[in-house]
Amino acid sequence: MPGDPIIVVTVPLARLAPTIVPQICLKTGEKAQCLVPTVASTIPRWAWVLMAAGGVPFLAARRWLFPRAELMLPARNRVADRWSLVTRGLAGCFAVAAVLLLWSVITVSPVSFFAAVFVGATATAVWWLLLPSVWILAELDGTQARLSGVHVSAARALSSSS
């Protein structure tokens, strides 16, 4: 429900295996209908400096340099659809940034270059701000995942079945 509280919960990674995790939507607390691929990663404090370069370096470092674990977390179809819409929108913003960057290289235009950096950084910032309201923010902490934005009912189910 929209007014229900959301919390942060730390769960061992082994507990989040698709066959073990309770089939309760982590965002709504209702019975899950699907599994959503989610990446839990460790992000060092200094990594936010990479946002100034347009967001792409930050996302690339998050993808290839920082420790990460791929999870399949339970969700309702409408939550998964909303998350899919946000990720497609983000991909579109980065496509616009790539076109602007290519245009700046072809035309040797500093304005297009800074526009590409601005679009990339803004898209990354919006993604980071929207993430907790649309889906679960998963941070990797050794052999555990810290999940932010979990519905209180799902958090109870995760802790009671541990």
Image (tube, rainbow, N blue to C red):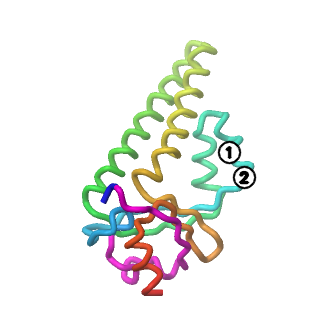
Circle 1 sits on which residue?
48
11 falls in the magenta region: yes
Looking at the image, the residue that sits furthest to the front is: 3
Instruction: Name the disc covering residue 45, or none.
Output: 2
Looking at the image, the residue that sits furthest to the bottom is: 161
Q: Does residue 134 sit above or below 160 in this rendering? A: above
Mark 1–mark 2 contact, CB under 8 Å? Answer: yes
Q: Residue at x 39, y 51 (%)?
A: 134
Q: Which residues are magenta?
A: 3-24
Q: Residue at x 28, y 52 (%)?
A: 81
Real-space Cα separation, disc 1 to disc 2, in angstroms: 7 Å
Q: Position of residue 27 (x, y in %)?
A: 37, 62
Q: Position of residue 50 (x, y in %)?
A: 68, 41
In the image, what residue type sits under mark 1?
Trp
Tally of numbered discs: 2
Task: Give the structural element (helix, strand or loop) at label 1.
Answer: helix
In the image, what residue type sits under mark 2?
Arg
Q: Does residue 112 sit above or below 154 in this rendering? A: above
Task: Give the structural element (helix, strand or loop) at label 2.
Answer: helix
Q: Does residue 119 sit above or below 112 in this rendering? A: below
Q: Position of residue 54 (x, y in %)?
A: 61, 33
* Quadrant assignment for the N terminus: bottom left
